[in-house]
Amino acid sequence: MPSVNVHLAMTHLVPLAKEVDDDKVTPGVLGFIVFAVMALAVWGLMKSMNRHMGKVDFKEKEPVGATAGGDADRAADERTGEK
């Protein structure tokens, strides 16, 4: 059940979309408002994602005890039981 505030807001916004000529199809003011809100939401999400990605450390740490490629392969084979 929608709240009273939502109902009142929609009754005021729907006439804004009905002010255009019935022979023309345009998005109107309501379409612009929806697009603007979506654009602001995407902008905020991108800003937040950029901030969070800046905190991520992409450098891989070398495993303890692995020096050269052969030693790392040998250590992996011993753990899995392969030769």
Image (cartoon, grey):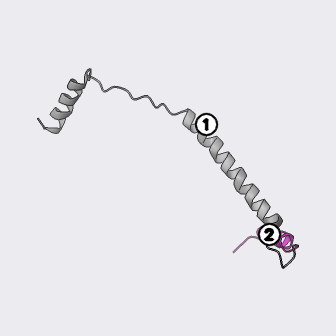
- Farthest residue toward the left? 83
Q: Is residue 39 above or below residue 61?
A: below
- Farthest residue toward the bottom? 22
Question: Does the magenta segment cover residue 17?
Answer: yes
Which residue, given by chain and number where applicable, does mark 2 sit on?
Answer: 26
Q: Earlier in the sequence, mark 1 or mark 2?
A: 2
Which structural element holds mark 2?
Answer: loop
Which structural element holds mark 1?
Answer: helix
In x, y percent, where is residue 76? 21, 33
Q: Report the magenta residues as a range.
A: 1-19
Which residue, given by chain and number where applicable, does mark 1 sit on?
Answer: 51
Residue 53, by quadrant, is top right
Q: CA distance from mark 1 to mark 2?
A: 37 Å
Question: Does the magenta segment cover residue 31?
Answer: no
Q: Pointer 2: residues within 10 angstroms few (<14), some, or many (20+)?
A: few
Q: Is residue 63 left or right of residue 55?
A: left
In x, y percent, where is residue 40? 72, 50
In x, y percent, where is residue 5? 79, 67
Q: Looking at the figure, which quarter contains the C terminus? A: top left
Q: Is residue 54 left or right of residue 1?
A: left
Q: Nearer the viewer, mark 1 or mark 2?
A: 2
Mark 1 is on which residue type? Answer: Arg
- Farthest residue toward the front? 23
